[in-house]
Amino acid sequence: MKHSEQPRKKRTQRDYNLGFKLAIVAQVEKGELTYKQAQKAYGIQGRSTVLVWLRKHGTLDWSKPIQHQMPKSKETPAQKIKRLERELSDEKLKNEILNTMIDISDKQYGTGIRKKFLPKSIRCIQQQRPISLSRCCRLFGISRQAIYQSQKRSLARNKQLSQVKHLVQQTRMDMPRLGTRKLYFLLKQEFDRQGIKIGRDALFDYLRSESLLIQPKKNYTKTTNSKHWLRKHPNLMKDTSPSRPEEFFVSDITYIKSRERTHYLSLVSDAYSRKIMGYHLSDDISAENVVQAFKMANRNRKTTKNLIHHSDRGLQYCSAIYQTELKKHKIIPSMTDGYDCYQNALAERINGILKGEFLINICNNGTELKKLIEQSIETYNNKRPHWSLNLKTPNFVHNKKSCEASFTGLN
């Protein structure tokens, strides 16, 4: 079955969020693409749209784009290096195959090729003597038809895989560090619709060959001060799991850097649905700023049932400002025992997803960062599937279970 490559539709400015713009800027500044190549590859509307993004969000001087024109080869230095690395890898593979064939010949047939010395005249004759495809096929016991069929299948497969790459890039516009398993789940129906036969493991292999697998990032900065004299509360989440939305809220604080300074992001999430209910970005981690995230989460509630607020033993959560706000809305406080961060693992995990999959490019200032966080949380809540939710999105699970709980309460 032949598959015709579908033309790529151009997209308008509203189709690109700030995270995608920053990713394009990073690609161009690293030399992986020119701004013209980026516009063509992603079908971006306008002649200088990417150049505008570079001037606004980048770190290089793009006031004179003529200095950054491509050479006649139309390859950036990074692209040339990758091409040469691929060619070198191919030559190494060819040498390995030939050496293996020589070893097999010496071992099974006693030819002793490695020990023989061929005179210069004979070597020259052998190098000049053409070897036909028919003779090679006859020696190895295969037919020319099999060679041609294999080439035809390889070309058809490469054409299919180019469509796979395009679909992956389109999905990663919104979720640039989405894992391969979730990618396969989201794209499987589109693969079937276009007649592309590829399984999960084959998708892993293809993305690995195209350097599109996501590499984990590890970092750690302490933002919690648990050594204080304020009252701590017992852990009410120990040895229990949430059975409905808005039964437990989990909170945590993480840091995010811009080129301007270090900022702090406070998050409040629902433990059942993994939905981020409230957030607040600030330049410090004072209790007055941290409590703003909880106020947003409380405004976004869909039920009025009993609620437990779980956090670590940070100074901000134990403060009078935060505890007064919880008491005002009749919310029960809960905290980790001692300094065990794993007792607040769910909040830590949501922080990690947000920073590791969405907030991966550095913004110029706090204003840009606020916009990026807003768009990223919207995508996280409404588009990103979770394994713990049977590959449903947090907003879908939260709304569905909240409606069921409300209906049960009315009956």
Image (tube, grey):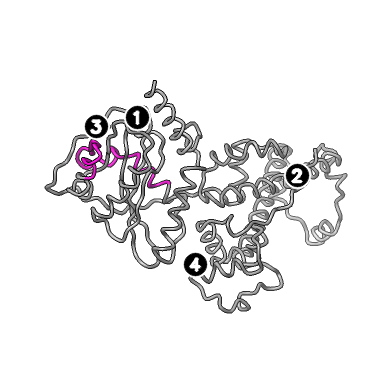
Relative side of 357 to 31, left or right: left
Residue that appears at 33% across and 62% down: 262
Question: Which residue type does callout 2 highlight?
Answer: Ser
What amino acid type should be assigned to the residue bearing mark 3? Leu
* Labelled pair 2, 3 in contact (Cβ < 8 Å): no
Q: Which mark is residue 154?
A: 2
Closer-to-camera residue (149/156): 156
Out of 122 and 236, give the one closest to the viewer.
236
Residue beneath label 1, please? 242
Tag 4 or tag 1, which sits nearer the N-term? 4
For the C terminus, the quadrant is top left
Q: Tag count in the figure? A: 4
Residue ID for mark 4: 57
Q: Nearer the viewer, mark 2 or mark 3?
A: 3
Instruction: State which tag comes first along the sequence, 1 or 2.
Output: 2
Q: Are marks 4 and 3 in contact (CB under 8 Å)?
A: no
Q: Nearer the viewer, mark 1 or mark 2?
A: 1
If you read the primary sequence from the N terminus, does the residue marked by circle 3 or circle 1 appear first? 3
Amino acid type at circle 4 is His
Q: Position of residue 49 (x, y in %)?
A: 61, 66
Name the secondary structure under disc 2.
helix
Instruction: Give the CA distance from mark 2 to mark 3.
Output: 59 Å
How crowded is the residue under tag 1: few (<14 C-alpha within 10 Å), some, or many (20+)?
some
Label 4 secondary element: helix
**What is the magenta range?**
325-353
Q: Are marks 1 and 2 in contact (CB under 8 Å)?
A: no
Q: What separation in Å lies between label 1 and label 2 (alpha carbons)?
A: 51 Å
Give the residue type at disc 1. Answer: Pro
Count residues near mark 3 (Cα–Cα under 10 Å), then give few for <14, some for 14-19, many for 20+.
some
Please give left or right for residue 82 compared with residue 365 in the image.
right
Between the residue at mark 1 and the residue at mark 4, the CA separation in whole angstroms equals 42 Å
**Residue linked to disc 3:** 236
